[in-house]
Amino acid sequence: MSENREKIQEEIKKQGDLVRKLKSAKESKEKIDVEVKKLLALKAQVAEEDESASGTGQKFMLKTPKGTRDYNPQQMALRQGVLDKIVAVFKKHGAESIDTPVFERKEVLTGKYGEDSKLIYDLKDQGGEILSLRYDLTVPLARYLAMSKISSIKRYHIAKVYRRDNPAMTRGRYREFYQCDFDIAGTYDQMLPDAECVKVVSEILSGLDIGDYVIKLNHRLLLDGMFEACGVPADKFRSICSAVDKLDKSPWADVKREMMEEKGLDETTADQIGEYVQLAGGQELVEKLLQDPKLSAVKSAVSGLEQMRKLLTYCEVLGLTNEIKFDLSLARGLDYYTGVIYEAVLTGVPEISTNGGEMEPVTLGSVAGGGRYDNLVGMFDPRGKQVPCVGVSIGVERIFSLLEAKQAAEGIKIRTTDVEVYVASAHKGLHGQRLKVITELWDGGIKSEHSYKENPKLLVQLQHCEEQGIPLALILGDSELKRGVVKLREVTTRKEEEISRENIAEELSRRLSLLKN
Amino acid sequence: MSENREKIQEEIKKQGDLVRKLKSAKESKEKIDVEVKKLLALKAQVAEEDESASGTGQKFMLKTPKGTRDYNPQQMALRQGVLDKIVAVFKKHGAESIDTPVFERKEVLTGKYGEDSKLIYDLKDQGGEILSLRYDLTVPLARYLAMSKISSIKRYHIAKVYRRDNPAMTRGRYREFYQCDFDIAGTYDQMLPDAECVKVVSEILSGLDIGDYVIKLNHRLLLDGMFEACGVPADKFRSICSAVDKLDKSPWADVKREMMEEKGLDETTADQIGEYVQLAGGQELVEKLLQDPKLSAVKSAVSGLEQMRKLLTYCEVLGLTNEIKFDLSLARGLDYYTGVIYEAVLTGVPEISTNGGEMEPVTLGSVAGGGRYDNLVGMFDPRGKQVPCVGVSIGVERIFSLLEAKQAAEGIKIRTTDVEVYVASAHKGLHGQRLKVITELWDGGIKSEHSYKENPKLLVQLQHCEEQGIPLALILGDSELKRGVVKLREVTTRKEEEISRENIAEELSRRLSLLKN
């Protein structure tokens, strides 16, 4: 470690202490924020120092790129379990799957993400096309539909996307992360596909062991109509929408200040918006708002409300009432939404994580989101032909983080292999016999392994079985082999018996299927 | 299309005619090669023209980046089927899985791939670390093992890798492509893990419907010993090895010329190599070579041969004889191999594909390859600690291409969804009833879908079932619903009967499990 790095580490420690003191003294948010900012700046300095040290080749840093991680076998087993459950729901709803390249021609991504475009990873110009890593799976889907001239599809796509964002990895925020998208494209009747997306999210979140959740629903037409009714100029709809989107993280006072100081709204307008965005409820709220004198005078507001009424009716038929909420503060950041918007949040008690010594509540926030985007495909079609789309994206990284923390807390250990039988030697000189037996098992379709040492110790072999949760062990010994038998050990009970060496794969298959039932 | 582009297209046509004429006249290879080169240059010109046209923004090109492709639902179903089979074999052998980021810090990849390093995709320097897309899964594995201080693992990794190579997409060669790797890392006894890798490849290739294959085996120590015995200077071993590697594509005369003219060998040395690399066989060849006066005088040759003897003995126990071949011409391009090397090739009759009008034999070549690399992990460990590794990589893209062509030729259509029941309306006004029924089915775990139109035509709904291969359709009608029943139609036989509307999910589950058995 360089001297400078040590010095900064010392400062970080001091600054961390200060922040904790202010927090426990319940000092004002502004005061705390100032000190937290200083702390973050110090941490960034260390990171920069590390990067430049490695850049100059002074020392080789053995690490993954910033904001990324390897998945070890335990994490892979967890991840595969979660993805399998999600895919099962997508398939239950009849979705097909597609895949697109990890990078796109840069122009495909240009102009689709508003302010967030600065977070796109570009590839170096090495001659030929100018490329960027995909930022989400929605724009590639739209490009695919336009390019393949597909006018209807129900597809899922599970793949990694890339954002040069500030990673907060303890909260499941990475620069390389999975998205699990389900989208329905096609010209259909109002709200039928939109309601099914809510059902899909609900089935997925109910099937994962992550506690209670609520799916917030709103409509872009209603938001626009509300802005119009409050007197927001039309050219400010999108930027005011972005401000409203911050309500899940910031208090109304901050959002109001942004609307007035940065976006130039007058206080009356802002206050009127403030009253609406506090509203949330169900069908009764829709009816109430349809009677609202200001809203009912604006065409798009009425249209948005009527669609919300239909959506809520369908949701009720689909068995969804307690887990959904019509919420006027839901805005979603992305520009391309044109209709219904969704966002699912976990409502369980936030857990506490230690992030570099500091105790922080794990605010998992949104675990799914999406909406209707009817104009995106048309941006790619040479003749502007539209394909209406609606879809949801499951925030699996946050779900992985949550389940990982939960399993760690509960001391749960997942198996990382499926091995059913371990073939062991009781003494030296048996590796040839082991190879013969295990060949029969493999050829008989039995998941099995053995030691890659010629003469492993029996204890080591049995320990491996116990650590890995392998249910059965075959123990070969010369005296048994002479009698035409081998020892079969049930690993958990340590019960042993002799079985015939002949037709050993068949016998084990029989026993394994008994064990499963 | 620009005028210039049209002109070139015309020239391409003429040049193609010329090449075909020369070929059918059985003209000399040199003469044909000259004209083929001209043809390729013309084709490259068109590609460049296309790229620059899109680069200047004159027109928006709706395409995926060069050398990449989207996978449509049919291709995804095929791909998933192949990958499932491969993963099943990996798991049968007790492998865990890991994942690494799609990009690595550039220095991780530097100096690992020899000449091929020029094919690495770099990311643009946008501040922070300098990154490159992974070129294979082997170097990231070595980085992972060193970084996590893991001294033994048996893992598989299925993921995309990136090479700025000249794509030949009709033959399954892309710039973005899947690798399916199985590796065994750890300090074990000679040839036990190495032989299992051969078994894994054999089980995978036998399980896929791609015809006969042979797994060629050789040993880097034997190659080096052979070069030494023939009088190649030690500093030329790797470059002569690269020349030998071309024997699967070029005749010996060309390789010999390269050895003499480019690599500076004298003719006697080259001729001696030429005699050895024509040899192939089994255990008897090992014994013969151990008696060879020149080879038996070189320590590494003897050591390589003794290891080959052990490998072939183990392979025989593992039930592998006809599908393996000890082949002295097998060299493998990569620098990092230190022991056994493998390569599996298909031996079925090559099929013919039409590539832009020209008839070309589909030479699928290698469909799996790998070897032992004992020094790679040590290149990442700060103290140079070695972790010996051996592994194989399945060339799935070529397998996808082959199976796709085969299915197209045989007119086989794979289902792209798993939908079991389609809920249809017999007449108008039933979308609410449909939603109720399908909610029960979904909640009962039945894979089902319905139309997103309120009043779809019955014929259209039934056609969808037939096209998609959905086995059962429920047809709702007012008169049936009044009587508490719905019509159940078996799609293939078109047989219809009435079943009770009550407990409909249970009844369908029962019938579906009967259909499966």
Image (tube, coloured by chain):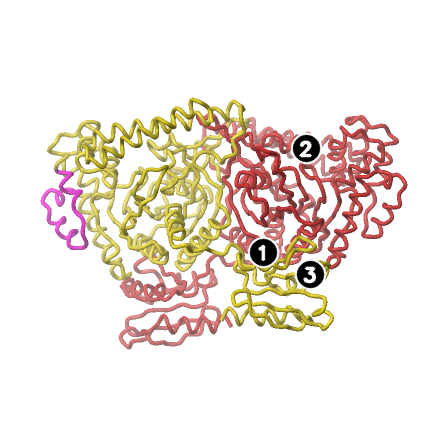
Chain colours: A red, B yellow
Kindly identify which chain the residue marked by label 1 belongs to: A
Magenta range: B272-298
Residue at mark 2: A15
Q: Secondary structure at mark 1?
A: loop
Res. B336 mark:
none
Residue at mark 3: B427
Q: Secondary structure at mark 3?
A: loop
Res. A94 mark:
1
Q: Is residue B248 above or below residue A319?
A: above
Question: Around disc 2, counting alpha carbons within 10 Å, would you say few (fewer than 14), some (14 to 19), or many (20 or more)?
Answer: some
Cα separation, mark 1 vs mark 2, equals 54 Å
Does the image show residue A188? yes
Total labels: the figure holds 3
User: Would residue A196 appear left or right of B98 to someone viewing this image?
Assistant: right
Task: Residue B310: give x, y in percent of width and height.
Answer: 23, 55
Q: Say whether mark 2 and mark 1 are on the same chain.
A: yes
In the image, what residue occupies the spot 12% across and 38% down? B272
